[in-house]
Amino acid sequence: MAALSIPSEHIPPGMNAVHVGSPFLPTAMEEISTFGSKKVFVLANKSSRKFIEGDDDKFVNVLQAKGLLAAPLCTSIGMGGGEEGLLAACDEAYAADADIVVTVGGGAVQDAGKLIRLWLSTKSDDGNKEGGATVQAIQAASNRDPMPSLPPQIAIPNSFAMAEATHVAGITTKSKTKSGAAHKSLMPTVIIYDPALSAGLPDWVRFGTGLRGVEHAVGAVTHPKSNDDIRSRALEGLAIINDNLKKLVSNPECPTTQSNLYVGGFMAVRALNQGCYPSIGHLIQNQYSARFDVHQGSCSGILCARIMDYHYDKSKEYQQRISAALGDENTLATKLVRDLVATLPAVSNEHAQVKVTDEMLKELTQWMFENNLERFNSLSPKEFESVEDIYGMMTKPLADL
């Protein structure tokens, strides 16, 4: 099986390089040298720590030996980018006067790195920051015009969520709502994808984040603001994702398969981010994830096919193209996505599997209807007219798709 590469036309402005299948340590050190950085702030999720810290030849230890480590390795970021851990990381990087951020781990860590860079860029701003970073202050920083230069970010993902390929950064607030910031300057500067960092990943992370690539492609293809170019790019990525996600089930540690899944996922998320983010699926699943503490992979497993089914009569033409990309143009795309999810180890496809009850769903869908109806209808190919529309979509039996 041949390893794929990312076509240059898919790499966005502001991103200097994407290294696929490269060993992360020498690649990262070379990039740090190119930037001329002297104070490197390293942020990682706890499961990645063993790959980058400990022995003398590990990344953090090498930085420390060279006098380049700005602060001790930070591992305060939890699933979904919780507010408390994020703000603590912002303050640590700020106090260390970091001039580059290196992020090793999943989507929450990659998004946190973007926001840390944003907070670091406020050093030249007027105003008292003695109280430290706050969500409101970070969001205010994202609205500056003109935006000052941000320190570079080297993003080194260990899974396939693709947050590192966007200029959007999410935060889960203390009140269990999804917030964040977006600005073109938040785009990471360099990405290094080394499959070695995915070794030993739990199935719910490996296959859940892989499934998010399907979600990105579906959102880009069916979004009301999509166009032929966006759809073509997304469908090209989706075909690669489908092929390699299926191969990953039988050989989860295959380096080439993982690299190719990354390539397909990158292409799909970049298509989505050409004016189609968020899609209706993303918005609903982000809110579900924040409210119920459910990993976004299982959010897609539970909701992607159900949401597609809801708007099928308005997106039929595009869903037929999704079917072709998934390898079976004669079967409904909703069924193909449903059946693909059923093959993925440890990815949930029913609310009960993640301990979300009917009462919890009724409360959430009522909140969605009261607070997000206008936005939902701007993102969905088919409008919602009642809370029953939202509830019925989210609870439709998979066997009826």
Image (spheres, rainbow, N blue to C red):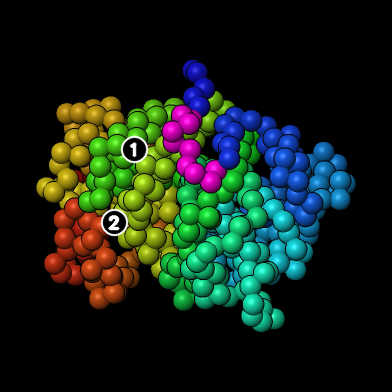
* Residue 390 visible in the current orientation: yes
Report crowding for label 1: few under 14, some 14 to 19, many 20 or more residues within 10 A (C-alpha): many
Q: Classify residue 259 as left or right of residue 119.
A: left
Q: Classify residue 285 as left or right of residue 116.
A: left
How far apart in space, not on screen, are marks 2 and 1 (Cα)? Answer: 16 Å
Residue drawn where x is 46% and y is 60% of the image: 182
Residue drawn where x is 39% and y is 48% of the image: 273
Q: Secondary structure at mark 1?
A: helix
Residue drawn where x is 21% and y is 62% of the image: 377
Q: Is residue 378 magenta?
A: no
197, above or below 141, in the image: above
- Residue 169, position in %: x, y? 50, 59
Q: Classify residue 201 as left or right of residue 366.
A: right
- Residue 334, position in %: x, y? 23, 42
3, above or below 220, in the image: above
Q: Amino acid at mark 1?
A: Ala
Q: Secondary structure at mark 2?
A: helix
Residue highlighted by disc 2: 280
Residue extending furthest left? 313
Between 221 and 332, the one nearer to me in the picture: 221
Q: What residue span does the magenta drawing correspond to?
A: 6-15
Of the two numbered discs 2 and 1 in the rendering, the one whose residue sits closer to the viewer? 1
Pointer 2 or 1: first along the chain? 1
Report crowding for label 2: few under 14, some 14 to 19, many 20 or more residues within 10 A (C-alpha): many
Q: Amino acid at mark 2?
A: Ile
- Residue 224, position in %: x, y? 22, 51
Residue highlighted by disc 1: 234
Instruction: Name the disc covering residue 385, or none.
Output: none
The number of numbered discs placed on residues in the rendered structure image is 2
